[in-house]
Image (cartoon, helix red, strand yellow):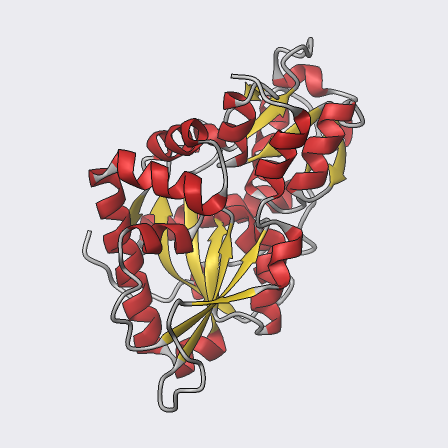
Amino acid sequence: MTISRRRFLQYVTTSSAAGALTTLALPGVSYAQSGRPVLKAGDQKGGLRTLLEAADELKQLPYDIQWTEFPAAAPLAEALNAGAVDCGPIGDAPVIFALSAGAAIKIIGANRSDAYGTAVLVRPDATLRSAAELKGKNIGTTRGSIGHFVTLKAITAAGLSPSDVNFRFLPPADTITALASGSVDAWATWEPYTAVAETTGRARVLVNGRGLWSGLSYLAATDAAIAAKQEVLRDFLSRVVRAQVWSYQHVDAFSAAMARIIGIPPEAAKLQFSRRATKWRNLDDALVAEQQRTADFYSQVGLLRQPLDVKTTFDRRFPIKV
């Protein structure tokens, strides 16, 4: 399937930077009600709100949810750091940048997905065929994102150093425009952007994240929210886990709901969802060790000013049934 560049950009930019300033109330909920706590939940495109809505997990809530959507993890991390949101989904690499910047947040839940869709993309007609050929090229991505991380892992595995490529740090909507115009040679991104680019014929995968990225993503919460809303966060996480189980029991229904809610082609929604195979898991020592290796890698390539000990950033008081 091929579509116009204009239509493709509509898919990519839906709910992106402009939507980051919009808070979305649950239908029928009055925020004037007294005595009900409010959870300020951050989200990313194709994230938690879609999952919870599709699985009917937003019904009969004992609290209200105020949603704010972000185009990527970096601005969500900034909102967490500022206390503008209480919690939000964030990948293992972006959370390291947030913690190194002094963010008062904790990881309360974790999931693992197939890493394929976190990838370096190029135009379909590009001559590039390997990570080694990225030397001297311009690569668009979001600083500190899992796309940034996968690119660094890919080029170092190919014998290159970070200085051998030129990173241009842009939000997803600007990066796909830059790729189409040729002002960047590659786009390091993640799902659902990868699936949209593939299924619309606008880009192909040069390097996928398998063997490069852990596939770990988290639900992070601010220290203040954990102190004041621990039971709310516990309930919210439980609903997310139940919704994830439901989603893989109803792949077609959920994929259709995802396409409708976040505004991407149905085939892209099903592709990115099916291949991610996301599973939530409890926090344990092995997972903490994986996160430490990611932090150590960022230190090795000079992106952290000082080494980061991640152990204290995991709050294990939110066990889940897996």
Q: Does residue 140 appear in this view?
A: no
Residue drawn at (45%, 62%) of the image: 220
Left or right, 238 with respect to 207, comes to left
Q: Closer to the camera, 294 or 79?
A: 79
Judged from this view, the residue extending furthest toward the front is: 28
Dividing the picture into quarters, in which one does residue 298 lie?
A: top right
Q: Position of residue 83 (x, y in %)?
A: 57, 74
Q: Does residue 30 appear in this view?
A: yes
In the displayed structure, 68 sits above or below 70; it is below
Q: Closer to the camera, 217 or 240?
A: 240
Residue drawn at (31%, 63%) of the image: 58
In the displayed structure, 130 sits above or below 258; it is above
Judged from this view, the residue extending furthest toward the bottom is: 34
Q: Position of residue 238 (x, y in %)?
A: 26, 62
In the displayed structure, 225 sits above or below 109; it is below
Dividing the picture into quarters, in which one does residue 315 lie?
A: bottom left
Left or right, 320 with respect to 315, comes to left
Q: Position of residue 288 (x, y in %)?
A: 39, 52
Counting labels gives: 0
Left or right, 57 with respect to 107, comes to left
Q: Position of residue 223 (x, y in %)?
A: 47, 75
Residue drawn at (65%, 40%) of the image: 172
Residue drawn at (33%, 75%) of the image: 232
